[in-house]
Amino acid sequence: MADDFSQSLTPPVSPGDSLCELAPVRPPCFCCSDLKDDPSGVLSTDGYVARGSLKRLLLRLDPAPAEFETDMVDIFGFSWVTETALVESTKLLFGLFRQTIYKLETLVQSGSHDFGQAGNLHYEAEGLRQECVTFLQYVKVFLYLEPSRSMDAGHSHPYEEQEAQLPSALLEELFGVTLLIGRLKDLPTNVQSAFIIQNHGKIFPPSWHLLHLHLDIHWSVLEILHLLGHKMQGQVVYAHQFVNLTGENLTDSSLFDEHLCSLLCDLTGLAMGKYSKVRPTEALSSHHYLCTCTKELWVLLMYLLEYRNKLLHTQSFWSHMNSLLRPLVLGKPSTEQFSGLPTHCKDTLGFTWWLVTHLAMLGQYSRSGVVQNEKDLGDNWTFVDELLKLSCNPKVSLAEEQLRMHVHCCLSLCLLWEPSTSAVSILWDYYSKNLSASFTVPWLGMSGLGILCKTPLALLEQARSCCSLPPLRSPGHTQLYRSANSFHIFLRLLALCLAQDRAGGVPQRQIKGRIYSKFSSKKMQELSEAGLMNFLLLFLVVARQVELEDVASRACELLGFLPSNCPLGHRTLVWRGQLSMVLLFQERGLDVGAQASLLASSFNETAKEFYNKTTEVSRRLALWGPLGSYLEGVAEVFETSTSLSLSEEKLLSEGFDWLLPACRQSELNSALGFLQIVLAQLRRVHQRSDQSAPTLAWAPATTSVVKERHLAVAAALWAHFFPFLRSLRLSQTPPAQLADAAAGFTLLAFDLPSSAPQDLQPNPVQSVMQYFGWDDMVHPLLVTRYLSHLLQNSELVSSLSGDPGVAASGSAQSLSVRAWFRCVLQQHLHKNPDGTDNRTGRAVEQQLCELTRLVLRLPEVDSLLQRASLNPTATRPEPTAALEMFVKAVGSVYSGLKALSERSAMVTTALDYIGDILKHIKPSLVGKNQEGIQLAYWAVGCIVKHWSPLLATSKAQQLLFRIVDGLLLPHNLTQQDKALRDSLPLYIQGLSMASSMSQSQGVYLKQQLRSVTRRYLDHFLPSSPSVGIIANHPVLLSACEANPTSHGVALRRTILEVLCQSFLQFKGHASPPRLASVLMFLLELLRRNSDSDPSLLTVPLPSLLRCIMLVNEPQVRKASTDALQLVVERCGGAATERPCDQIISVLRSFVEENEGIYDKQVYSVLEIVAVLDPTVVQALIPNLSLSLRNTEHKRGLGKNIALRTVYVKLLGLLGESGQAEITSLESE
C-alpha cells in the first residue's frame, strides 16, 4: 500500500517519456466532499451533471472525448489494448472489477478507528474506487466507439465473432454486478451511515468511498444499458448464457427496468427514513435526499427517463413515481417491481406530498446542473389531484397541521408548474364545506393563528399578500406554514390560478362561478365569525384578481342575507370587509359612493341604537365594538386616499349626530381622534391639489371637480361634528382631543372658508377662534392646547394680523394675548386644594409653556418687546416670568409715547390685552390654592405698578378703582394675607405714581393711597417691636429705594403723614397703641432711605419730640431718640451754611404748644437737640427766654428758680449765645 501511495504522489518517468505528458483526467463520479450547505443548490463540480456527462449522454455524444485515445490503457494495474480489451477480456475485466469492490468492502470491514491511519485508509479506498470508476467510464466509451453490428450476422474472423457476442456478455456481466452490489437499502448500517458524514474536508473513511461507489455503479449500470440499447438500434439484447442456464429471459430493457425500479424504490425508502424526522413547519426547507450525491442521482434519473420517454416512448419519470407511490398512499401492497419499500412510515400521504414537491423542485435543474425557471420536467397534476382528493376526503378528516402542509406543497407545485384549475376546484369543494373551521395548529401557539386582521387595511393587506407570492425558495414561502393557515394558503393558490387568465377567460369564469355557487342564504346565516372572516378574505382575493365591481356587488348581495339581529361580532366583520372593499375601489381609482352609502346606512342604524336611552348599558358597551371598528376603518379610508374625490364623504353620515352625544369619555376620545385624522387628511390632500394644479395642463377642469369633492367632505364634517364640538366647549372637564379637533376645524375654515356653515360667516376662522380660544368662559386646558395648535401656523397668524374682519373688542393677536393672560392667571386653579399637581394641572402647565413661547413670537407682542428692549432669552420661557416681562414692555412703551393719540390707542390696546382681569382672578381668590391667590395678587400688582401712568388716564382709571376696592380694601383679608404681604409694595408704588399723574382723579387716588397705606400699616404692624417683622413690612418695602426719586419721595411723604396722623397721635397723656413698633417702623423707613430734604424729614419731627417728652419707656425713648438724631443730622447736613429753618420752625412751634405745661420736659428735649445741633436751639434763645418770662408772669410769683435752673442748664450747652443769655438772666 505504501508503494502504491508513493507512486501516486511521484509516478515514475522513464527517459523515453515526454515531460509534457499530462496526467489523465479523472472521470466524473458522485462526490459531495467539495460542497457545503449552498443555498443556491449547486451540484458537485466533479459530478456527472456538472462535468457534462448527462448532457453528452442525452445528446448522444462521446462520454469522454479526451480519454482513452492512446493505444494502451491502464485498468486495475494492468495495461490493455484500448480498442479490443473489453471484447477480448470481458470476463477478466469484470472479474477484476469485482475483486476491486471486494477489496474496498474488506477495507471497510477491517477499518481502523486509529486517527493516525485515517489518511492512509482514505487514499487507499479512494484509489480502489477510482479504479472502478475508470473501468466503468472505459466501458461507456468503448460502447460508444464500438461500431454497430448485428449479433445474428455471420462473422469470418474470431474477433468479429467475439465482438458480436459482446452485448450479450456485457448484459450478463452487468446483471452479475447488480447481484453483487445488491440494493441500497440492503447496505450495512455502517456504510449507510456515511450518508450523513458532515466532514467537508478531504479525508473520509472507506465506508464513504464504498457507499459512493455503489451510487456510481447504480447510475453507470443504467447509463451503460441505455448506451447498449442505443448502440443496438432497438434490437433486443438477450443474456444467452443466463437463458441457457436458468430458462428465464434477461434482456437489456428488462434489466434496465428492474434496476431502475429497485433504485427508485431504494431512493424513496431513504427519503422515507428522513421524513420521519421532518417537522411540518420544515417540510419545504428539509430536503428528501441524504446528501447531494443522492440529489444528483435523482436529477440524472429524471432526465434519463424523460429522454427515454420522448425517444423510446417508455414510461416517464412521473409515471414510474406514480406507480411507486400510489399503492403507498392507498394502503395497498406494492407491485412486484417496487418491492422492498419500507412499511414503517406512519404518514404515507404526507410523505408522498413532501416527496413529490421536492422532486418537482429538482426538476428546475438544467442539464448543466444550474437551477432555472424553465420547466424541463413535465407536471404531474393527475397524480397530485388524486392526492388532493385524499387530503380533502371527509372520511379521513385530516388535522389542520397535516392539511396545511399538503396545501403548502400544492402551492409550491403551482409555482413550479402551471396552476391547476382542477386543484383549485378540489380544494374549494373542501373549504366551502369547512369555511367556519378555525384552521389552527395548537402546538404552534400564537404563530399558528395567522394574521389577526383587526382593521380593514390589515384585511386588505392580507388579501394583497395572498396575491403577491414570494419566490419559491425564499423564507417567505418556506415559512408560510407558520404564518398562514391552510385556508390562507389555498387563497394564494386561488389567486395564482386566477392571475393566469386576467382577461376573464373560461377557467377564470369557471372558478368564479364555482365560488358563487357555494353560497346561499342558509349558508351565509350559518357562518361563524371565523367563517365570515374567511368569506370576506376570499372575496377580497377574488376581487383583486378579477372584475372588482362584479365581485363586490356579489359580496354585498351575499352579506345582505345575514339577519338584521346577527351577533355584533358579525356586524363588525361585515363593516370591516366592506371597508376593505372600499379601500380596494379606492386603490383602483373607482368611485366608492355605492359601497359607502350601503355601509353608512347600516352604521346609522347602529348609531341610533347606541344613542337610544332605552338601550341597556351592556348592549351599549357591546355596540361600541362595531362602531369603534367603523371609525378605525373609515380613518384608514381617508388616510390612504390620495385625492378624496371618490365620494368618501358618504361615509361621514348623520349617524355621527347620534353617536357623539352618547359616547363615554374613552369612546369620545376615540371619536375625536378619528375626527382629527379626517380633518388633517382633508387639509393635506386639499393643499396638495392646490399646489399641483398649476403644473397640469388639464388642471382647470380637474381642480374644480376635486375642490367640489373636498367641499362635500368638509360640509359633512361641519354638519355632523362641529355642532357637537361647540356644545362641549364650556365643559369643565374637556377632553384633550377637543382642542385638537377644534383647531382642525379652524384650519379647515382657513383653507376652505366657503365650506363653513352660514352662522360662522363671513369670518369663519375668527368665529371658531372666538368659540374655543377667546371666550373667557372656556377652560384653560382647552384654550392653551387649542391656541398652541393655531399659533404655530405662520400663515394663519399672518392672515389674522392684517384681517380687518376681527371683532371690535380687539385684534386677533390682542385677543390671543388676552386668552394667554387669563390662562396664566388661572394656571393653579386645576391643582389639588393642597397645591399638589394632578393630571389636569400638569397638562395645563405643559401646554401653557408652549403657548407662552408662541405668544411671545406674535408680531404684535414681539414688536412691543423689541421697543422696550426686553427680549426673552429662554427658548421655553416660564409663563409667569413672561407675563411680567410683557407687562413691563407695555408700560415701558406707553411711557415712551409722546403723541396723545398714540397714548390713547395704547391704553385701549393694553386694556384689550388684560380684559376683565378681576373676573379672571376671581376663581383664584375664592379658591383655597395659595399659589393661585399669590399669582393673582402679584400679577395685578405688576400691572398697577408698571402701568400706573396708563391706569391714571380717564379710560383706565375705573379699572384702577376696581382693583383698589376689590383687592386692597375688601372687608375680609384672612386668605389673602400672604399674597398681600408679598405684592403690596407693587400696589402702593403704582398707586402713588398714578395719584401724582392723574389729572381728573388725583385727589381721590391720593385719598385711596392713604387709605391703603393706613390699613396695611396697621394690618401688618406687630403688637410688640420685632426687627425681623418690621424690616419686612410691605409698606416699608414699598417706600425703600437706593437712590431717591421724586415718586419715591412723594410716597414716603404720604407714609410719614399717615404715620403721624394715624399712629403717633397722643390722646392726652395716653400713648398711641404699639408706639414702640410704630417708632421702629419710622426709624427703619428713615434709615433705609437716604432722603435729605428737610421738608420731608421734618414731617415726623413734632411727633418724635412729643414722644421723647412724654414717654419714658426705654424702647420708645431709644427709638424716638435715634429717629430724632437721624432727622437732625440729615437736616443739618443739608443746610451747611446756616441752621435748618424747618427744624427751627418745628422746634419753635413745639415750644409754643407746650408753654406753661411741659416747660421742664421741653427743656430736656431741647437739651437732646442741642447736643445734636446747637445752632438750631441757639436760634430759639429769644423765644425760650420770652416763654420763660411769660410763664413766670402768668404764675405771678416772681422768678421760678427751679425752671430757671433747668433753662440755664440748657443755655450752658449753647456756647457763647447761651452764656450771654445766662448773664442777662442773672442781671434781672
Image: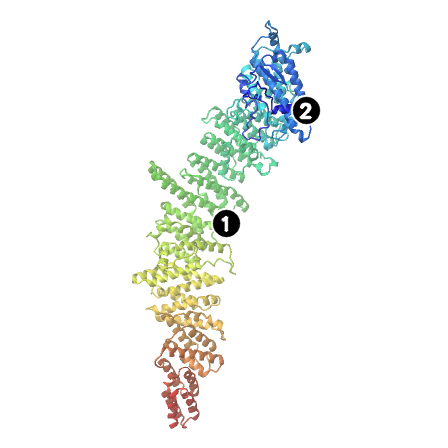
Can residue 1188 be seen at all in this image of the molecule?
A: yes
Q: Quadrant of the C terminus?
A: bottom left
Q: CA distance from mark 2 to mark 1?
A: 86 Å
In the shown orientation, is residue 475 left or right of residue 1098?
right
Image coordinates of residue 1135 in percent, x first then y, are 35, 79
Crowding at mark 2 (Cα within 10 Å: few <14, some 14-19, many 20+): some
Mark 2 belongs to which amino acid?
Answer: Leu
Residue 498 position in % (x across, y down): 49, 28
Q: State the quadrant of the N terminus.
A: top right
Residue 107 numbered tag: 2
Q: Is residue 385 above or below residue 1187?
A: above
Amino acid residing under circle 1: Gln
On the image, the x and y values in percent for residue 843 come to 48, 54
Q: Secondary structure at mark 2?
A: helix
The residue indicated by pointer 1 is 665
Answer whether residue 1228 is visible to the viewer in this image: no
Query: Is 65 drawn above or below residue 894 in the view shown?
Result: above
- Whether 493 is drawn above or below 228: the answer is below
Numbered disc 1: secondary structure: helix
Front position in the image: 399 or 927: 399
Q: Residues within 10 Å of mark 1 (few under 14, many from 20)?
A: few
Give x and y (percent) for residue 34: 58, 28
* Tag nearer the camera, 2 or 1: 2
Q: Nearer the viewer, residue 1196 or 709?
A: 1196
Among the 4 quarters of the image, the one containing residue 900: bottom left
Q: Residue furthest right?
A: 110
